[in-house]
Image: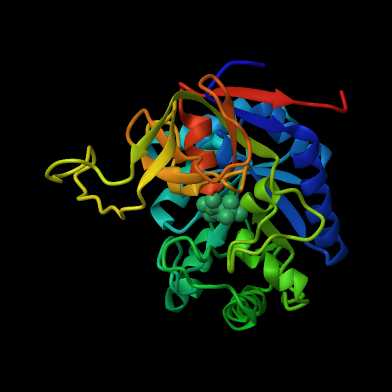
Amino acid sequence: MSLCPRINIDLEKIRHNARTLTECCNHLGIQVAGVTKAFSGTPEIAAAFIEGGVSMLADSRIENLKKLNHLEIPKILLRLPMISQIGEVVQYADISLNSELKTIEKLSAEALRKKKKHQIILMVDLGDLREGILEENLLEIVGRILKLEGIILMGLGTNLTCYGGVIPNKKNLGRLVKMTKTIEKEFKIKFKVLSGGNSSSWYLIENGDMPKEINHLRLGEAILLGRETAFGNTIPNTYQDAFIFTAEIIELKEKPSLPMGEIGMDAFGNKPHFEDRGIRKRGILAAGKQDVVIESLTPIDEDIELVGGSSDHLLIDITNSKKKYEVGDQIDFYVGYGALLQLITSEYVCKNIINYSN
Ligand SMILES: *Cc1c(COP(=O)(O)O)cnc(C)c1O
């Protein structure tokens, strides 16, 4: 495959990562929902998740769940539903995460209209300050939800580390467990699901610190990049290179490291700073900020330095590289989460799906 720029997607590595994580989780009685939003719900990758053992798929956008409609597995809408999309939510998601009674009432009405039940997980804010109801309102809201005939309340969930950077631990997840017990006692019900977060909760599994009542996790990055997100550590027995970004050299020249002339704003309104390192061997690659979050790339050739970029250009310094690069050569990068999101979304980047085992 010579099309460039491209993202190479190794389905066998993704399958392997999914298998490693789901086996660990299932051992502890935890179900894994594989989160598909970082790859825009590409069906081939979602299928690799399923082959790797996830028991549900989850995405923040209904447009992505639609693409997965043919895969027979429960699907979760992760972002709180828009009232303007209620019809599609009930049609394409079996489960949605919720925190607004008004929305839940609309979901119930829509489910009854479609002669269905819609399942929800009620989100509780444990301090990260993104979505979720606060503890003091919990009992009242649960009481009202339980009266809605089109809704099945599966249980509680929480999301951490996404906005406030709050790390999940025994203490805050312990609060969620306690709230669950209070509700179950008060209303004489038994919840099916206690959803303990995203890839930032993974380290609790490795440390043996996950509260035993937590029986559900929603994992995206941990499967895709083999990395937990509370501390950024790699996960044992997983691949970090299931996704590789490749871009082509379109200029290669010796140039000074210090721009010549008065320095104003760059193309993005920032005033750049430079260090004088003398004459360097620099390359320009044909990809830029329209395609990828540059800071989230790591060159596979460790002797290449990523210098920066603009909308359509990526600048590298190859002075220290042992390889003899030429114009037309292709340079490979490991991708982080931000790069992955944008590469998959950019219409200029070719998606090269590799599936060795088929
Ligand atoms: C994105 C998201 C996830 C998955 O996050 P990862 O860090 O990729 O594991 C889980 N839950 C919710 C609510 C999300 O929005």
Q: Quadrant of the N terminus?
A: top right
Residue extending farthest to the front is 278
State the residue at coordinates (53%, 63%).
Answer: 159
* Left or right: 26 as drawn, with respect to 264: right
- State whether residue 206 is above or below residue 5: below
* Left or right: 164 as drawn, with respect to 230: left
State the residue at coordinates (75%, 41%).
Answer: 14
State the residue at coordinates (46%, 49%).
Answer: 80
Residue 189 visible in rendering: no
The part of the image, by quadrant, that contains residue 284 is top left
- State whether residue 143 is above or below residue 282: below
Q: Position of residue 106 (x, y in %)?
A: 44, 44
Q: Position of residue 10 (x, y in %)?
A: 73, 33
Q: Quadrant of the C terminus?
A: top right
- State whether residue 232 is above or below residue 186: above
Residue 315 visible in rendering: yes
Residue extending farthest to the bottom is 171
Residue extending farthest to the top is 2
Q: Position of residue 146 (x, y in %)?
A: 57, 61
State the residue at coordinates (68%, 32%).
Answer: 9
